[in-house]
Amino acid sequence: MLPYSTITEAEVALNRTLTFAETLWYNYSANKSDYFLYCHNILFLFIVFSLAPLPSAVMELLRSSNFGRYKIQPKVKLSFSEMFSCYQTVMKLFFLVVGPLQLVSYPSVKFIGIRTGLPLPSVWEILMQLVVYFMVEDYTNYWIHRSLHCKWGYEKIHKVHHEYTAPFGFAAPYAHWAEILILGIPSFLGPAIVPGHMITFWLWVALRQIEAIETHSGYDLPWSPTKYIPFYGGAEYHDYHHYVGGQSQSNFASVFTYCDYIYGTDKGYRFQKKLLAKLKEESGNGCQQNVGSYYISWQDLKAD
Ligand SMILES: [Zn+2]
Ligand SMILES: [Zn+2]
């Protein structure tokens, strides 16, 4: 809720005219409570979980020669019903865990100081805060994920997320309810350290999930814009983690590659990647630059 009853009042308080974006924000949010604005995340997450996995799901169902060559584990073919059943479980979790978590976590958002007022943050400020959020999340998620691979954590909690050894978009939020709650902490930590505007917070929640869905898509697309992000892990990186499964001691990081590099948990992956490249070259298939080519993949190697 904004503390101004008219745009003119807001302009007097800011001592300047509102920008176009600020006028839109004023018109939209002036009479809405901060709690209601925060709860928009529920709608955004529903849209992201339902729509963002669709492109890779369509690629999977069509599996034309154009897209098939980018499938990281080509021997796995998912049917519509398999993907839909995963989506149904994700939606159950969404309404029983994710949604209620958003509804009750508002006091913490209020406490850390996520603001809803004017002025709006600049694009630069939003970008810088998002970079911090992604880095804080990546580092914290690395250690939580790594600890979930201990015998107890894996058997009791993390095993659910690893049910799919060849991940696909809809399987990104597929996890034990306890894992969803635990992994809420790294996502919240960045905004707690560098609190920003509600719009930044919305963007963060949506982008983090879009990133997770892309990472689980099962397709390594050479034209993906994320290829230009330094130290970005991507689909092929996380696919290897799922492929190896429970005993995996590789590729724990959620977004970037540097944590695994620093702590030496990418050695198995790098070794297999080299082996795969060699195998492709020997088979005359080396012209395909993608590691997960249509002909040779992790599935042709003995995993670590
Ligand atoms: Zn794992
Ligand atoms: Zn995963």
Image (cartoon, rainbow, N blue to C red):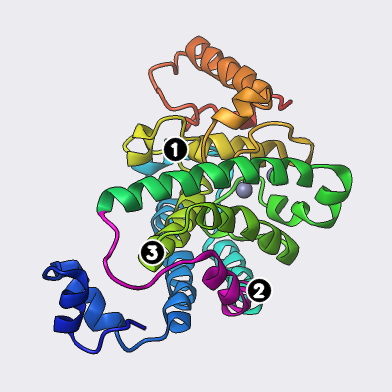
Dot placed on the residue nearer the N-terminal end, 1 or 2? 2
Q: Are marks 1 and 3 in contact (CB under 8 Å)?
A: no
Residue occupied by mark 2: 97
Magenta highlight range: 97-122
Q: Amino acid at mark 2?
A: Val
Of helix, strand and loop, which one carries label 2? helix
Q: Earlier in the sequence, mark 1 or mark 3?
A: 3
Amino acid type at image mark 1: Asp
Q: Residue at the spot x=54%, y=31% of the render?
A: 257
Looking at the rendered image, the disc whose residue lies closer to the viewer, 1 or 2, is 2
Kind of element beneath mark 3:
loop
Q: Are marks 3 and 2 in contact (CB under 8 Å)?
A: no
Where does the image place residue 218, in percent across and percent down from the top left?
A: 51, 45
Closer to the camera in the image, 89 or 201: 201
Amino acid at pointer 3: His
Query: Can you name the residue that lies furthest to the right here?
Result: 152
User: Residue at label 1?
Assistant: 220
Tell us which disc is closer to us: 3 or 2. Answer: 3
Distance of mark 1 from mark 3, alpha carbons? 34 Å
Disc 3: which residue:
197
Circle on res. 50: none
Query: Residue 50: x and y, percent?
Result: 46, 68
Residue drawn at the location 63% of the way across and 21% of the way down: 272
Could you tell me if the residues under marks 1 and 2 are in contact, i.e. CB atoms within 8 Å?
A: no
Q: Nearer the viewer, residue 228 or 130?
A: 130
Could you tell whether 20 is left or right of 188 in the image?
left
Q: Position of residue 64 (x, y in %)?
A: 37, 46
Sequence order check: which comes first, mark 3 or mark 2?
2
Q: Residue furthest left?
A: 17
> Can residue 224 be seen in this snapshot?
no
How far apart are the two marked residues, 1 and 2, measured between alpha carbons? 31 Å
Secondary structure type for disc 1 = loop
